[in-house]
Image (tube, grey):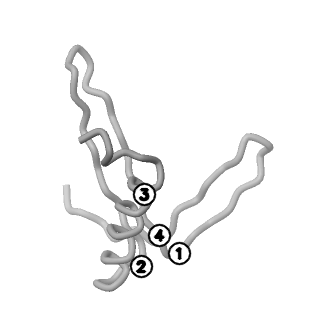
């Protein structure tokens, strides 16, 4: 199957409210049945080169803030 460009993401909240994003980054995690690993898929919509730098540096900063790297 040919990859398709993502046009937007829609988030549905528990109260039924929906919000669409035309620029963003989504990570899908699917646990592999019977295994101790998972398949991780990165989905992007409207993201360019500088945006990728912002995403990665923000995730690293978040990891630092929650003490993730202190344990490594």
Tag 2 or tag 3, which sits nearer the N-term?
3
Judging by the rendered image, the residue that carries numbered circle 1 is: 22
Question: Which residue position is annotated with label 4?
Answer: 24
Query: In the image, which is nearer the foreground, mark 4 or mark 1?
Result: 4
Question: Are dots 3 and 4 in contact, CB under 8 Å?
Answer: yes
Measure how far apart labels 4 and 1 are at the Cα level. Answer: 7 Å
Q: Residues within 10 Å of mark 4 (few under 14, many from 20)?
A: some
Instruction: Tell me, yes or no, whether the two marked residues, 1 and 2, touch with CB atoms within 8 Å.
Output: yes
Q: Secondary structure at mark 4?
A: strand
- Labels 4 and 1 touching (C-beta < 8 A): yes
Closer to us: 4 or 30 = 30
Q: The C terminus is located in which quarter?
A: top left
The image quarter in which residue 2 lies:
bottom left
Query: Element at badge 3?
Result: strand
- The residue that mark 2 highlights is 46
Query: What is the C-alpha distance between the residues marked 1 and 2?
Result: 6 Å
SS category of the residue bearing label 2: loop
């Amino acid at each position: 199957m040919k990859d398709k460009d993502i046009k937007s993401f829609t988030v549905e909240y528990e109260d039924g409210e929906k919000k669409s994003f035309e620029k963003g980054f989504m990570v899908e995690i699917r646990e592999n049945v019977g295994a101790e690993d998972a398949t991780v898929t990165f989905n992007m919509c409207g993201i360019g080169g500088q945006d990728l730098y912002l995403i990665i540096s923000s995730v690293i900063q978040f990891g630092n803030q929650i003490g993730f790297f202190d344990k490594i």
